[in-house]
Image (cartoon, rainbow, N blue to C red):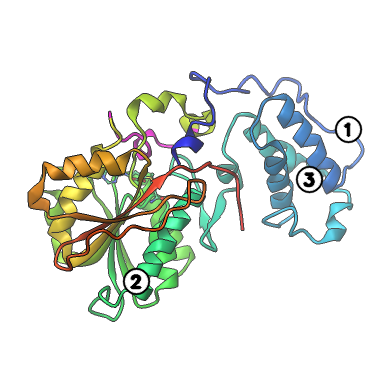
Amino acid sequence: MLRALLSGLGWRGGIWGCTFSSQQPHLPPARLLNATELVSHWTVVFEKRGIPEARESSEYIVAHVLGAKTFQSLRPGLWTQPLTPGQLQYVQELSSYRLQRMPVQYILGEWDFQGLSLKMAPPVFIPRPETEELVEWVLEEVTQGPHVVGAQGGPLILEVGCGSGAISLSLLSKLPQSRVIAVDKGEAAICLAHENAQRLRLQDRIRIIPFDVTLEGSWAHLLPWGPVDLVVSNPPYVFHRDMEKLAPEILSYEDPLALDGGEEGMDIITHILALAPRLLKDSGSIFLEVDSKHPELVGSWLQSQPDLSLNLVAVRRDFCGRLERPGKTQSPGRFPRMHWVPNTGMNKCRRS
Ligand SMILES: C[S@@+](CC[C@H](N)C(=O)[O-])C[C@H]1O[C@@H](n2cnc3c(N)ncnc32)[C@H](O)[C@@H]1O
């Protein structure tokens, strides 16, 4: 995620395009345009205004107004059919948000993650494609590792920092025997995770709990729900000094608390690592998405915390990084095991 978040390098605060709105200068020509012409029109407007992913943005918006998820999935007849005045107006309205650098996911109000359609609303963190790989890795471990079996035949999973519920809900949807405890500090995140669980009819297997992992002794509140088989998290891990370099889409719309990991990006990570052994079963596992600098930093930190008895067993790079086999160096069996996905990815608009 990190590099992706830095894609707005050079920007230093404020919202690009916020002066937009004067005289509706971007209205397409008066005659009714078809979908293809409209996409071309808005692509040019977005490009001229320096909006990233100009074509993808206009395609998503036009497709959404026509009731499809992607432009390619539109019935071909709709590509050349003129839009109604109401539809044109709606495209205009949504495009004006994009000119104000609002992320497409918030404009559409929903986004796909692991084949699930999730409601999106600012300022709750938008799930990134890289995090789908973290989910896939957890699924691999659960389905291939016989040690990961909870009381009801599937693992009991704790997710710290659930945001919209993307990770928890996709794990639940793929693991019908599993149950999840999903916690987050943000009120908006808790509400949205609830809403998404209901939307996907997964509410019976998930407990969504307001919880701040940094509060002293907070783990005790979770004890009645444990012990858990797995802890999974995509915590805030951006180095504080990098926060101001993030793209306007992120800085202006997403909750900084979802991103800012403190001086070395480790503030929340260390709290999760300190908490996890108290809640994990023996031989349970922790899966974390982190920055590419973190495995080394956390390795040193762990050496100073021998009481945690945590062992790093594998590191995997995300899809934009160098391919690397997971190096399972230690698997003593009786200690919690850690798995890392250091993030080297780009945050492209991508929808299934
Ligand atoms: C990077 S977002 C990940 C959201 C979601 N898991 C995903 O991958 O889309 C990090 C999440 O951690 C939450 N968070 C930040 N600080 C926290 C804390 N001290 N305790 C619990 N959750 C926290 C944020 O509210 C945010 O929802």
Amino acid type assigned to the residue bearing label 2 in the image: Val
Q: Main secondary structure of the magenta part?
A: loop
Please state which of residues 238 and 102 is positioned toward the viewer in this rendering.
238
Cβ–Cβ under 8 Å for marks 1 and 3: no
| Residue marked by disc 3 | 86
Q: Position of residue 308 (x, y in %)?
A: 11, 52
Residue shown at 44%/44% (left/top)? 125
Residue shown at 22%/44% (left/top)? 299
Q: Can I make out residue 103 in this image?
A: yes
Amino acid type assigned to the residue bearing label 3 in the image: Gly
| Residue marked by disc 1 | 29
Q: Position of residue 5 (x, y in %)?
A: 48, 35
* The magenta stretch spans residue 256: yes
Q: Position of residue 323 (x, y in %)?
A: 47, 52
340 vs 300, left or right, is right
Residue shown at 49%/18% (left/top)? 12
Amino acid type assigned to the residue bearing label 1 in the image: Pro
Q: Earlier in the sequence, mark 2 or mark 3?
A: 3
Cα–Cα span, label 1 and label 2: 55 Å
**Range of magenta residues:** 253-263
Closest to the camera, between mark 1 and mark 3, is 1
User: What is the residue that sits farthest to the left in this orientation?
Assistant: 307
